[in-house]
Amino acid sequence: MDIEKLKEKKRALGYTNEDVARLSGVPLGTVQKVFAGVTKNPRRETVIALAGVLDQDMAEGLQKTETHDGKDINGFKQKKQGEYTIEDYYQLPDDVRAELIDGVIYLMTAPLSEHQLAAGEIYHQLKSCAEEHEMSCIPAIAPFDVQLDKDEKTMLQPDVMIACDEELMQRRGIYGAPEFVLEVLSPSTRSKDQVIKLKKYQEAGCEEYWIVDIENRRVLVYLFKDENWPDIYSFDDRVPVGISEGLCEIDFTKVEKEIARVQGIKE
């Protein structure tokens, strides 16, 4: 059983429930109930988040084998993970949120309120700056398809992005690598955003990648042209947008205020 294996990993690493909650983003009460056996059938995204801290191989395996309502992942004859294409992605039901990475379908759960408020505030600040300085770059916010590698095997939905090359913009989304990409971490996407997508964005030619970690109140900024990345900021900082050449920065005290509006709300 996955939970029993995770409990063994937790003991081997010497982690407390508090450590696991802090690192995974899963509420402490939920972590306690899962490992105490009170919650008999925890949600899949919760198990994936816990595994992302305790057993990376399990986390990736769970993400890769996830299906929708127990049916074939696209409603048709199921392929092996790694064989899916853009055509399969477009045939997913409208109520299914997913990303396609190197032929692997990753289903996504609806984000928490704090996630959406953080992404919305960041997008608002980026858009305001672009308009103020009459920049040609276009900020966009999810859901917005990005056919990152210009192939048939990958389609991502970054939380926030900026495209400065007008040729990238198409009616169905962005065809190629945006100059700027930002992901707000969620419990079920931490490992994907911090490992898999980090590598994909770098290899595709994105110039700048931000990871916003609400749980730990920090921002990791990857300027891929530099050697010593990431730069790490707190939510007390004004974080400069590298591709804007000093024109734009994000005031994370305002992001913090938005998040505070929903802090403490029960799940």
Image (cartoon, grey):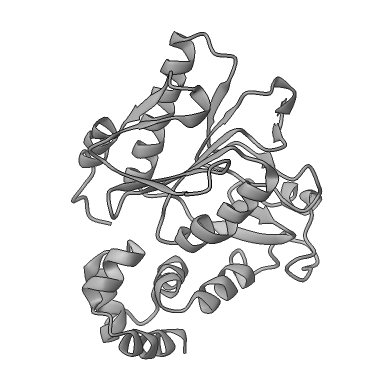
Tag count: 0
Q: x%, y% of residue 81? A: 73, 68
- Measuring 75% from the left and 66% from the top, which residue is drawn there? 82
Q: Quadrant of the C terminus?
A: bottom left
Horizontal side, residue 5 vs residue 25: left or right:
right
Q: Residue furthest front?
A: 227
Q: Is residue 202 above or below residue 131?
A: below
Q: Is residue 111 above or below residue 39?
A: above
Out of 150 and 33, give the one closest to the viewer.
150
Front residue of 90 and 23:
23
Asked which quadrant contains residue 15, the reply is: bottom left
Picture coordinates of residue 74, whole percent (x, y) = 72, 59
Residue at 45% x, 70% y is: 52
Left or right of 59? Residue 259 is left
Position of residue 101 in the picture relative to residue 27 (left or right): right
* Residue 180 image position (x, y, % from top left): 55, 34
| Residue under the image location 24 percent in, 76 percent down | 17
In this view, 265 is above or below 161: below
For the point 43% across and 89% down, which residue is it? 5
- 156 up-or-down from 138: above or below: below
Answer with left or right where residue 71 lies relative to residue 184: right
Closer to the camera in the image, 80 or 231: 231
Q: Quadrant of residue 266?
A: bottom left
Q: Quadrant of residue 234?
A: top left
